[in-house]
Image (cartoon, rainbow, N blue to C red):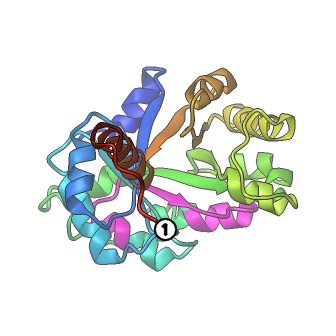
């Protein structure tokens, strides 16, 4: 198995650029994969994606240079093992609140002695050469999402978890956990401070930090904070924005009013 391009980017001190997809359209996943994104997160948590959708999306990315990452719905070692067996080269787990939860997540992603993943990579397998088994523990990238006040109070312990590679900010849930509304207000001083603290904890532990950078100016802000992994687009938003631009232009040209 060739070295994970995400790790190659980081070794060259480069920022990884990522896009999220719902897994509902294999064609969309393949088209986005061909554009040059470093990775794609196939989201199982807040979409209708089922396991079969994830597998077909991973297959669609096989002929592209883009790395498939799967965000699982929760810290379930059986499902984590299945998406890795299907060929995912990264797993993102939501709601990592403490060291024990981080260790459970990492353990599901690693073969013994680093973890407790069961061996059976039916798609990821290398045909018997042994290369997959030998490299999987160091190849697969693990993303723990920091999304709660509890997680913020345990940042250093979470970041120090052996085998955990990335602290990825969940800004909406982090805001809700603190008693606010779901928002990604990166210019807010409290939000900004939380992101800086997450970067600091990750880097102090020799790990990476990642975040969503979907709006105007977000990439610049993220770079200023020292983020290593940026999710800069989402399939649903791309479709909505593109369709709105096309419709708005056409209505101006033909002079039609919007439907009532």
Residue at label 1? Answer: 72
Q: Residue at x 71, y 51 (%)?
A: 183
**Residue at image location 60% in from the left, 26% down from the top:** 217
Q: Can see residue 147?
A: no
Question: Measured from the top left, where is residue 150 in percent x and y?
Answer: 83, 60
Where is residue 28 shown, x and y percent of the image? 25, 54
The 10 Å Cα crowd at callout 1, few under 14, some 14 to 19, many 20 or more, is: many
Q: Quadrant of residue 17?
A: top left
Instruction: Look at the picture and state if 127 lies above or below 90.
Output: below
Q: Looking at this view, is 54 or 107 the one in front?
A: 54
* Residue 44 x %, y %: 45, 69
Q: Is residue 96 magenta?
A: yes
**Where 163 sits versus 74, above or below?**
above
- Segment colored magenta: 82-105
The residue nearer to you, when weighing 172 against 243, is 243
Count the marks: how many?
A: 1
Tell whether position 141 is magenta.
no
Q: Position of residue 104 (x, y in %)?
A: 61, 68
Foreground: 248 or 154?
A: 248
Which residue is depicted at the point 29% across and 37% down?
Answer: 253
Quarter of image, res 103: bottom right
């Amino acid at each position: 198995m060739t070295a994970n391009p995400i790790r190659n980017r980081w070794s060259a001190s480069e920022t990884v650029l990522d896009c999220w997809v719902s897994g509902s359209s294999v064609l969309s996943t393949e088209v986005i994969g061909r554009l040059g994104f470093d990775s794609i997160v196939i989201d199982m948590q807040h979409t209708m994606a089922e396991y079969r959708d994830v597998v077909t999306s991973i297959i669609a990315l096989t002929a592209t240079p883009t790395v498939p990452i799967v965000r699982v719905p929760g810290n379930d070692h059986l499902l984590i093992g299945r998406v890795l067996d299907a060929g995912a080269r990264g797993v993102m787990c939501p709601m990592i609140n403490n060291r024990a939860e981080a260790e459970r997540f990492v353990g599901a992603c690693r073969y013994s002695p680093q973890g407790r993943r069961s061996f059976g990579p039916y798609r990821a397998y290398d045909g018997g050469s042994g290369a997959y088994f030998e490299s999987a523990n160091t190849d697969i990238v693990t993303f723990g999402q920091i999304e709660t006040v509890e997680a913020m109070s345990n940042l250093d312990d979470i970041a120090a978890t052996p085998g955990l590679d990335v602290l990825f900010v969940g800004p909406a849930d982090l805001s809700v956990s603190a008693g606010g509304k779901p928002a990604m207000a990166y210019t807010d001083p409290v939000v900004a401070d939380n992101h800086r603290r997450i970067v600091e904890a990750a880097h102090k532990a020799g790990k990476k930090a990642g975040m969503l950078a979907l709006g105007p100016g977000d990439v610049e802000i993220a770079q200023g904070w020292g983020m290593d992994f940026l999710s800069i687009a989402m399939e649903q938003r791309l479709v909505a924005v593109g369709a709105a631009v096309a419709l708005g232009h056409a209505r101006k040209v033909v002079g039609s009013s919007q439907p009532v």
